[in-house]
Image (spheres, rainbow, N blue to C red):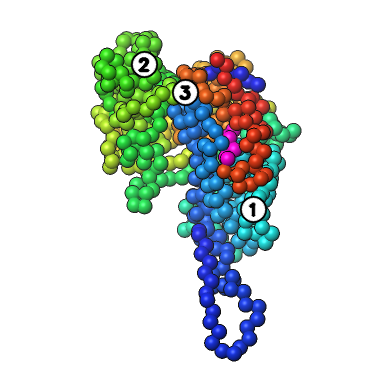
Amino acid sequence: MKLKYISKIVLTTGLISLLSACDLTELDINKDPNNPTVASARLLLPTAEIAVINAVTGINNNAMGFAGLLSSADNYDLNNQTYNGTWNGFYRSMSNVEAIIKASANSPKYLGVAQVLKAYAMGNFVDTFGDCPYTEAWKGNADEVITNPKFDKDSDIYEALIKLCDEAVVNLAKPSAEGLATSADFMYSGNLAKWTKFAKSVKIRLLLNSRKGRATGNADLNAAIAAGDFISASADDFTYNFSTASSPEGRHPWFQNAYLADNGFAYPAHQLMEEMIFNRDPRLDFYFYRQTSTILDPSNPTDRGTIPYGGTYLVLKPAFLAKWEATFGSAPTTADRAYIAGFFGRDRGDNTGVPQDGALRTAPGCYPAGGLYGGRNVTPRALTGGRGSGNGIWPLVTSNNMKYYQIEAILDAGGTGNARTIFEAAIREHIARVVALGLRVDAANAVAPTASATDAYVASQLKLYDAATSNAAKLNVVMKQMWYSSWGQGMEIWNAMRRTGFPSTINNPIIKPARQYALRLPYPSQEGSLNPNATAKLTEVVFDRDPVFWDKVKIKWEF
């Protein structure tokens, strides 16, 4: 990439008929003791957890597009209408978390959980929009009603959220008669130790993102990492597990889009698939399901209209075929070409029309969508409803993420530790989790890579790391591996690219994009029309010019 670093609560009011001569005073028909205005924290918790998951994954595909992994918003043609639903949905759904905080004065465990959920989701929201309502948000039903909340500075919100994580840890440790109900907590089943690790991990995430925008950023980050007790094993991951249920629908959104809707899923990026092929990445066939082995014919008018823009269909690219021969020692065989034909995506920034190619384009595989394995042992065929299980995952905050945070702290923030050792552990851990999910969701077809294949891949990545002659160059290698590992985790890599400027080896869009790189999301026009405090944001803040407070890199295309 050629970059320039510059529970729904129902209140009922009964109609009271006076059938006697009694005088009733202080009758308030808007208060019914049988229908409390605040639901219990226990009842609200499942809805609050879902709200946070939806809030954090709401722009996942777009963030992957910004990072060059997926053809979603990768031409940056964004405007003030694009994210109305994202903004409104966040504040509406997060009211459930606020309700728990208000209802939990005597329930410190629930209060601690709600606080860390708020810190995680709100931090993610600030990462996407910057300044936004916080201190006066969710006050529409307060004693002193605020319907036009002020916008707090993004840096001030971050400071409040960092403190909120500390408060959450204190509350989770407080003795109380009421524990955290296992049945109410589908994320950690009432395990307070895991919630505490999650709170400390969220704090590290906030400190990592903001370290260049805070005077004591690096010191605070390194102190939090040194304190330990964050997520360090997959058993403690904050990961949402989907089910195989179809009624009500409980399958992974990617699975629903690709396997149940004539593959309405966005195109995977050619660069990602191509590099994983040539790197012999053990995760390749777990990431992608190939629907076809047929090579389209450019001389056929119908086929020609289906081939991606500029003839960039991998199996027809001379450069790709030449690299195949150089990498594997011979030209691709007929069987090789049939295999390559199934990797049908798009180059970054290809904004040309979408033909009827749903039965051809590469679909998400086992990881993280709970789809099908796409290895050579599988005969490709078009997806139809009913194939696959859909019981994938959303990897939210994982031990793998935490390892990359530690590496960045060591290489770029003066932290201590052996970055190379952690890097190797991060690669091996991610491969293991990808393979484990694949073997579970497509047991009939998935084939685990051999130990020697995994070892060879890890060795190749460590060789690149060792050859890098500076910490910055080493971090570039690490961030490229994080890029490969971010299939399904768009916010993490979008944040990393804005935070570090790496990886610097992502292809430019093949068509000059409508706008510059997305440094944040544009403010929604709907908020501007409803809240006068938002009006100026729509004109004064430009999404591809004005970064959030912690972004000191300010990525910019150079064409």
Q: Which residue is mark 1?
A: 147
Q: Which residue is mark 3?
A: 349
How many C-alpha atoms fall within 10 Å of the one at disc 3: few (<14), some, or many (≥20)? many
* Residue 180 appears in the figure: yes
Estimate the x, y position of residue 540 in percent, counting from the top left. 67, 33
Residue under label 2, please give it. Answer: 311
Whether residue 353 appears in magenta in the rendering, the answer is no
Q: Give the x, y percent position of residue 541.
A: 65, 33
Amino acid type at image mark 1: Thr
Q: How dense is the environment of label 2, judged by Cα within 10 Å: few (below 14), some, or many (20 and up)?
A: few
Amino acid bearing label 2: Gly
Marks 1/3: CA–CA distance: 40 Å
Whether residue 425 is visible: no
Residue 85: image location, x then y, percent: 51, 43
| Rendering coords of residue 472 (x, y %) | 62, 20
Furthest-front residue in this view? 529
Question: Bounds of the magenta span?
Answer: 520-525
Front label number (2 vs 1): 1
The reply to whether discs 1 and 3 touch (Cβ–Cβ < 8 Å) is no
**Residue at left offset 36%, top offset 35%:** 264
Q: Earlier in the sequence, mark 3 or mark 2?
A: 2
The answer to whether residue 259 is above or below residue 104 is above
> What residue is rendered at 28% in x and 42% in y?
386
Check disc 3 and report its element: helix, strand or loop: loop
Kind of residue sitting beneath label 3: Gly
